[in-house]
């Protein structure tokens, strides 16, 4: 029954997945310190945070606790030392009150990078689950990542089209570029005031973004094409995971992961 339930959960375009057993999840963030993680910040590089951007308190990662509203701040991320593939990741976030330069006049922003490959950079080569006010669960492909997904045909001519499942009339869409490409989440307001629960299911070369129990974005055939040299596409199924730090006060907690069996029963269509 567990296998059947899991396959239903991972089927592209499926209805909302049934909640996974809580016992299957293991903490990725231990609530006490950054064991298993490293930091990467503008100006400071790896594992250096002289500005005290990152605070751990009450089993929560608090970003920019020590900065004043409107300060000019550094950005970056908190990344895993290990690479992960075939997993179901979930975390909770909520916004603080403060915003900072260079994004003071913009929406509060953060995110979750995954399938990070190669060297560290403030915007790494990866996929991203967007955490931005009104845009939570948008899908971003960065620097050579490409996916096949489905868009709402009404938004096909927009710079950032919106996701729509194939079963609901979504049209096939090949997404990706040498830079950063965006696909907005399924239409509708699913972000809550206070704590929100975000999930990523990465199974083989398919990915699913979930917000508060609602499937918001999906794609298959995750692949990488060298943004400088081009050439053949390389299937990507794993990489490092990182919490983005992007000039807004935000809290993260309950960062958990469960491993999935390697995907074999559902080849990409």
Image: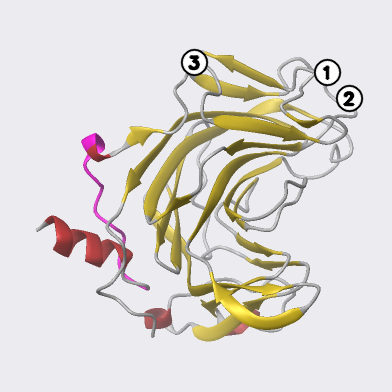
Quarter that holds the C terminus: bottom left
- Image marks 2 and 1: residues in contact by CB distance under 8 Å: yes
161, 54: nearer the viewer: 54
SS majority, magenta: loop
Quarter that holds the N terminus: bottom left
Residue holding disc 2: 71
User: Residue 123 vs residue 183: left or right?
Assistant: right
Secondary structure, mark 2, is: loop
Q: Position of residue 119 (x, y in %)?
A: 72, 50
In 3D space, how far apart are the residues under numbered discs 2 and 1 (Cα atoms)? Answer: 6 Å
- Identify the residue at horizontal 52%, vertical 46% (top origin): 191
- Image marks 1 and 3: residues in contact by CB distance under 8 Å: no
| Label drawn at residue 255 | none
**Crowd tier of the residue under label 2, counting other residues whose Cα lies within 10 Å: few below 14, some 14–19, many 20 or above:** some
Residue holding disc 3: 32
In 3D space, how far apart are the residues under numbered discs 1 and 3 (Cα atoms)? Answer: 24 Å
| Label drawn at residue 68 | 1
266, 159: nearer the viewer: 266
Segment colored magenta: 13-23
Please report whichever mark, 1 or 3, sits nearer to the chain's N-terminal start. Answer: 3
In the displayed structure, would residue 121 be above or below residue 3?
A: above
């Amino acid at each position: 029954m567990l296998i059947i339930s899991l396959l239903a959960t991972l089927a592209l375009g499926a209805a909302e997945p049934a909640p996974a057993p809580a016992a299957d999840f293991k903490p990725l963030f231990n609530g006490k310190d950054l064991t298993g993680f490293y930091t990467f910040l503008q100006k400071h590089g790896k594992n250096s945070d002289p500005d005290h951007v990152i605070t751990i308190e009450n089993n929560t990662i608090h970003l920019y606790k020590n900065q004043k509203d409107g300060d000019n701040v550094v950005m970056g991320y908190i990344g895993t030392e290990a690479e992960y593939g075939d997993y179901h990741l979930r975390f909770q976030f909520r916004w603080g009150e403060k915003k900072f330069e260079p994004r003071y006049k913009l929406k509060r922003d953060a995110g979750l990078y995954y399938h990070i490959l190669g060297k560290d950079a403030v915007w790494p080569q990866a996929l991203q689950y967007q955490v931005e006010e009104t845009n939570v669960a948008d899908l971003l492909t960065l620097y050579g990542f490409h996916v096949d997904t489905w868009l709402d045909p009404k938004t096909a001519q927009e710079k950032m089209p919106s996701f729509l499942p194939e079963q609901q009339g979504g049209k096939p869409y090949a997404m990706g570029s040498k830079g950063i490409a965006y696909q907005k989440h399924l239409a509708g307001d699913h972000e809550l005031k206070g704590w929100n629960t975000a999930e990523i299911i990465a199974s083989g070369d398919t990915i699913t973004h979930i917000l508060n129990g609602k499937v918001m974005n999906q794609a298959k055939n995750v692949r990488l094409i060298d943004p400088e040299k081009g050439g053949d596409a390389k299937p990507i199924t794993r990489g490092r995971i990182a919490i983005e730090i992007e000039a807004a006060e935000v809290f993260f907690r309950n960062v958990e992961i469960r491993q999935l069996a390697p995907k074999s029963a559902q080849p990409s269509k």
